[in-house]
Amino acid sequence: MAKVKSPVKKLLKLRMIDCDINSFMELARITGIDYQRLNKRLVDPHSFTVFELLALEETLHLTDEDLLNLIKG
């Protein structure tokens, strides 16, 4: 059975493509979020901190709707 990607991971991946960011490792470096912490947040989106969401928003130019979807998981 195929593994299902989380909607949060899909959303971030789409925005990363728009911003020419090739990997979550690169996203972590640009945002200043530790790579392991970012992976942990992707599994449990409810654990994102405000500062992490702000860093993602600034880097990926997330809309208000995107942010709400991130928070909802």
Image: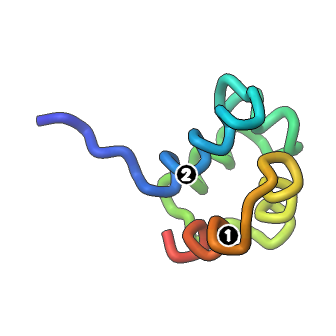
> How many residues crowd mark 2 within 10 Å: few (<14), some (14–19), many (20+)?
some
**Secondary element at image label 1:** helix
| Label 1 CA crowd tier, 10 Å (few <14, some 14–19, many 20+) | some
Residue 41: which quarter of the image? bottom right
Name the residue rendered at 51%, 62% in the picture.
44
The residue under the point 80% across, 60% down is: 52
Give above or below for 29 relative to 8. above
For the residues labelled 1 and 2, the Cα–Cα distance comes to: 10 Å
Q: Quadrant of residue 31?
A: top right
Disc sitting over residue 49 in the figure: none
Where is residue 68 shown, x and y percent of the image?
62, 76
Mark 2 belongs to which amino acid?
Leu
Q: Are marks 1 and 2 in contact (CB under 8 Å)?
A: no
The reply, left or right, for residue 26 in relation to residue 4 is right
**Residue at image mark 2:** 11
> Tag 1: residue type?
Leu
Q: Residue 51: x and y, percent?
A: 86, 66
* Secondary element at tag 2: helix
Q: Quadrant of the N terminus?
A: top left
The image's mark for residue 67 is 1
